[in-house]
Amino acid sequence: MLTGDILFIDSIGRPDLAGLAQDWVGDLRNTLYKRYKELADELLVLPAHYMGINEMNDDGSISEKLGVLYAENHGLQIDSEETFRKTVTENLPPQPNSYQEIRQMNMGKINPDIDEQREMEIGPNRCAVR
């Protein structure tokens, strides 16, 4: 399952990049704690990003079974909705490098050349809440 920016190996997505953290944190929780919970534990999760080399498999891939993530990912261990909301909204990292440019490109509003695209992707993964 391609989880994009919602679920990572050792963290969860951040709901604030559009400036709507308070509105979208509930959607994030619903996706992680209800929708994904209904899926098979054996389903292979393929996130869009990773935080560090420790998340890599021996073959260099970034993936894990959903059941393992529910057992080990700290973002999936918060029982209380109130605690989840507080944890997520109070632990947001700075926005990603070139965030506005990446957003404009994703919406088709700008078309940077390949060198500009590479430059936009340089830097740490700031798409996650740890």
Image (spheres, helix red, strand yellow):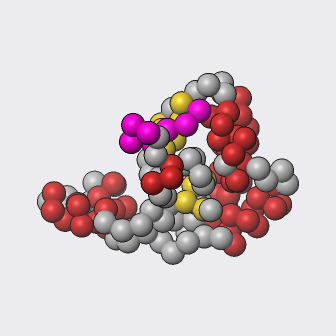
Decide whether residue 92 is among the magenta residues. Answer: no
Q: Furthest residue to the front?
A: 58
Q: Position of residue 70 (x, y in %)?
A: 70, 40
Nearer to us in this view, 41 or 114: 41
Is residue 62 covered in magenta? yes
Question: Looking at the image, which is closer to me, 4 or 24?
Answer: 4
Residue 95 in percent (x, y) is at 48, 71
For the view shown, which residue lies furthest in the bottom direction? 94
Left/right placement of residue 24 relative to residue 96 reads right
Q: Main secondary structure of the magenta part?
A: loop
Vertical arrangement, residue 69 with respect to residue 52, above or below? above
Check the image and report above or below for 125 versus 34. below
- Name the residue: 66% across, 37% down: 68
Q: Is residue 26 visible?
A: yes
Relative image position of residue 90 (x, y in whole percent): 69, 72
Q: Is 43 placed above or below 33 here?
A: above
Q: How many marks?
A: 0
Image position of 109 (left or right of 53): left
The image quarter containing residue 32 is: top right
The stretch in magenta equals 58-65
Residue drawn at 66 percent across, 24 percent down: 40
Kindly identify the residue that appears in the image at 58 percent across and 27 percent down.
43
Q: Quadrant of the C terminus?
A: bottom right
Task: Report the residue at 46% width, 46% height from top.
Answer: 56
Observer able to see residue 36: no
Of residue 1 and residue 55, the one placed in the foreground of this image is: 55
| Place of residue 85 in the rendered image (x, y in percent of width and height, measured from the top left) | 75, 62
Position of residue 82 in the picture relative to residue 129 (left or right) = right
